[in-house]
């Protein structure tokens, strides 16, 4: 076996859960080889480097061996080598952290931290600081 379809290989080494999803990724230009987007029928061989975009990160893998059969996760390192630059993983970590920081206030339920801050604020209010307003509604 000298060459294998890229969609079959990505499915076999568990980059995608199904071959259909691998085909869709190729059609949506999320799979590239040497900077050029590839079709699902593109033949790959050992030594090729592919880039797979799973936003916000672009993963890079070097093909070590070919297969068309899906394998257990333990055997995957024999067939591919992850050559993704560390900057991509930093981008992923920053995106994960930003999800908590950029939470829009007022959307969804308050967090435990929000509840504790509210309780602390209400406990810190001085006693006898009742707001009595004397409004004359008859005028």
Image (tube, grey):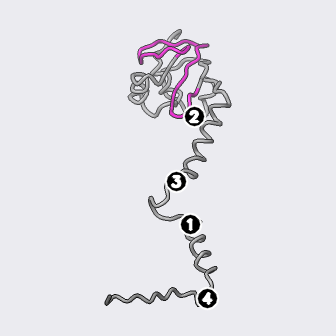
**Residue at 31% over, 90% down:** 138
Mark with earlier residue (2, 1)? 2
Which disc number belongs to residue 122? none
**Residue at 48% over, 14% down:** 4
Mark with earlier residue (3, 2)? 2
Structural crowding at the residue carrying mark 2, measured as other residues with C-alpha within 10 Å and reported as few (<14), some (14–19) or many (≥20) = few
The secondary structure type at the circle numbered 4 is loop
Comparing marks 3 and 2, which lies closer to the viewer?
3
Whole-angstrom CA distance, mark 4 to mark 2, is: 63 Å
Comparing marks 2 and 1, which lies closer to the viewer?
1
Which disc number belongs to residue 127? 4
Whole-angstrom CA distance, mark 3 to mark 2, is: 35 Å
Q: Position of residue 83 (x, y in %)?
A: 65, 24
Identify residue for label 1: 114
Q: Are marks 1 and 4 in contact (CB under 8 Å)?
A: no
Which disc number belongs to residue 103? 3
Question: Magenta segment range?
Answer: 33-59
Mark with earlier residue (1, 4)? 1
The secondary structure type at the circle numbered 3 is loop
Comparing marks 4 and 2, which lies closer to the viewer?
4
Whole-angstrom CA distance, mark 1 to mark 4, is: 23 Å
Q: Are marks 3 and 1 in contact (CB under 8 Å)?
A: no
Q: Position of residue 17 (x, y in %)?
A: 46, 34
- Specify the quadrant of the image occupied by residue 48: top right
Whole-angstrom CA distance, mark 4 to mark 3, is: 34 Å
Camera-side residue of 136 and 9: 136
The secondary structure type at the circle numbered 1 is helix
**Residue at 51% over, 32% down:** 54
Comparing marks 4 and 3, which lies closer to the viewer?
4
Identify residue for label 2: 73
Camera-side residue of 62 and 79: 62
């Amino acid at each position: 076996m000298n060459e294998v379809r890229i969609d079959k290989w990505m499915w076999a080494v568990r980059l995608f859960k199904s071959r259909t999803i691998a085909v869709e990724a190729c059609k949506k230009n999320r799979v590239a080889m040497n900077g050029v987007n590839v079709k699902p029928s593109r033949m790959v061989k050992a030594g090729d480097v592919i880039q797979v975009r799973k936003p916000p990160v672009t993963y890079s893998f070097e093909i070590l061996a070919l297969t068309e059969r899906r394998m257990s996760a333990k055997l995957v390192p024999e067939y591919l080598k992850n050559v993704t630059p560390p900057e991509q993983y930093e981008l992923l970590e920053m995106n994960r952290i930003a999800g908590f920081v950029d939470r829009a206030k007022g959307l969804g339920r308050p967090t435990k931290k929000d509840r504790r801050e509210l309780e602390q604020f209400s406990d810190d209010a001085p006693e006898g600081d009742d707001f009595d307003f004397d409004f004359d509604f008859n005028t």
